Image (tube, helix red, strand yellow):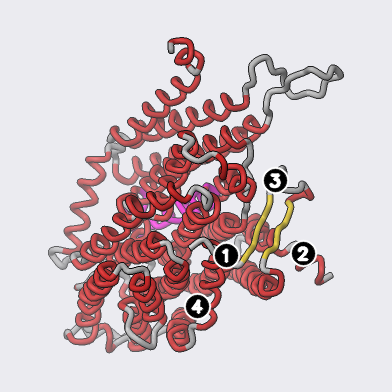
Amino acid sequence: MISSTVGIWNYWIVFCLMMIGLFLVIGRKNFLKKIVGLTIFQTSVFLLYITFGKIKGGTPPILNESINTIYSNPLPHVLILTAIVVGVATTALGLSLVLRINSEYGSIEEDDVSAQDLVDYHDDIETGKTLDLKFKK
Amino acid sequence: MIDILIKNLPIIVVLCPLMTSLLVVLIPNIFFSWILTTLSTFLTFLFSILLYQEIQIHSHISYALGKWMPPIGIEYIIDKVAIIPVIIISGISFIATIFAYKIMPEEIEKKSISKVYSLWLLAIAGLLGLVTTGDAFNLFVFLEISSLASVALVAMGAHKDKQALVAAYNYLIIGAVGATLYVIGVGLLYGITGTLNMADLTNRISDLNNNRALIAGFGFMIIGIMVKAAVFPLHIWLPRAYAYAPSAVSVLLAATATKASLYILARILFSIFENSENLINNTLLFVILPLSLLAMFAGTIMAIYEKDIKRLLAHSSVAQIGYITLAFAIGTKASVAAGFIHMFNHAIIKGGLFIAITSIGFYIKKRVTINNLSGLGREMPITFFCFVICSLSLAGLPLTAGFISKLYLIKASISSDDIWIAILILISSALSVVYLWKIIEVMWMRDGRKIVIKENPTIYISLIIITILNIYFGLDASLVVNGSFEAADKLIGDLK
């Protein structure tokens, strides 16, 4: 029982990281912390894939003269290279959005931002007084 | 020459917008960048029509990317199912691009317009890639290409209203979590089968029934895609993203973005996992069916109480997505066909409604709310006439496209002995008349401010095209209906 639990400790780490990341995304009200959580969440998936690729006693997949060589599976590594690129793009876009939110609202706390939005929304709709949007006149 | 073109069509459909998106960035002139975008989307539409004709002959085209044969290489598959979303996406994006010409410079800074068109093409390429690819991991890449591009497009609305930033941020975070969940699912499946090719996956999981990793992987994939498709409790990102995006972008996203993900959902349920019948039947009955019924009512009721018209239409989209997933959940051949029919019809209906509403916003230079609309029907007769036609179509009145999809949906639910589902569909359609009538009443029957508005032909040309489509497919639906039934035949086969 113990050996089987310890034997798959990689997966334990993966799923702990996954839950930590997901909790940060859902539970934090700060836009920046949410992105940190998202990054941890994505990294845990990278680890998951890398774990699939590892074979006990396997060598890096470079062609070898001897017949009995066991190769590790290179495909998950390649997939994860792609996923890392996607993750970097997501983080970059998210951070730039946070910057813009900070300059427009003066805060990156979700509560402050949604309070400001709510005021705008009700000004517009309930009182019949319409906000002038920045359309080109 | 033409032979080579036809052989490579599945990849050309994706590459055409992808490559032009790189070119468009280099052109600073607004007019020329628009011309190039229009040309590219038109060519894409032309290619997908060619592909449609080719499909009628061969019924299945497989393209091995870089001559690496599947299942090892990445495969692009177009069959009678995939052709439906391809036609929807390329056709609607062409119409939306025509519409964008006048409205884009009004809402976005001049210097960033060519970049916006580049993102626009990138989003279209991502969506087309999503539906043509036959490789589970490649699908994730396209999912992210399309959603990152559409997040950036939504954020461009910040020039007009700063709430677009928060909307885009939520869209990004929720979308990224969804896509990552999908990747976890693909990873688990890869771990137990050792393949990523969808057709190969189908074969290899057939003897793995009740494997726990299989069930977990399936769950992750389904939830990930349901986030992207905005199925009911996972739809939070949708109303804001559609409401605050630049007008042209709302049209493009509302009509195409969720359709691609819904197609993927159908593909996962009925094609990849077709051999694990128990799992699929349980998922359909206990997860998708209740959620779609809830979506139908929650979306409609939210729309009734909403006063911002773009948000109202977005909430109604949630309800309409509910109809499509409901059709999948019933799970018979007729109902899946009804789902595809509604997928097509909803694209032209919502496209038309969003074009009408955003062109109203263009003239009154304000956010379009119920109060702002009063009496405008007499000032802008053409726009509002088209709006009324499209709303009747949404409610499902005869002689419009919406009627056909409701008809087939109800027929399918009655023939599978689920009379109560048919009744619920009728009730929810009747409720949708409430919010549509609210808008129509305000527009035509209240006195409004007297403002003289000259309607601009460059804006309503796309509106008229899409309204004619709504009427045409209401009168003669044989094209859509036959196509959808062939698709359902391919997906469900002779199983049920």
Q: Work out which residue is located at the far right of the displayed protein and give it.
A: A65
Report, in whole angstroms, how far the alpha carbon at label 1 lies from the one at label 3. 20 Å
- The quadrant in which the N terminus of chain B is found is bottom right
Label 3 sits on residue: B71
Q: Which residues are magenta?
A: B144-165
Report, in whole angstroms, how far the alpha carbon at label 1 lies from the one at label 4. 14 Å
Q: Main secondary structure of the magenta part?
A: helix
Q: Nearer the viewer, mark 2 or mark 1?
A: 1
Q: Amino acid at mark 2?
A: Lys
Where residue B481 is drawn, which disc sits there?
A: 4
Residue located 26% across and 74% down the image: B426
The answer to which of marks 3 and 4 sits earlier in the sequence is: 3
Residue located 67% across and 33% down the image: A75
Which of the 4 image quadrants contains residue B232? bottom left
Label 4: element kind = helix
Q: How dense is the environment of label 3, judged by Cα within 10 Å: few (below 14), some, or many (20 and up)?
A: some
Label 1: element kind = helix
> Left of B13 or right of it: where is B471?
left
Q: Tell which subunit mark 2 falls on.
A: B
Q: Are marks 2 and 4 on the same chain?
A: yes
> Left of B117 or right of it: where is B440?
left
Q: Amino acid at mark 3?
A: Pro
The answer to which of marks 2 and 4 sits earlier in the sequence is: 2
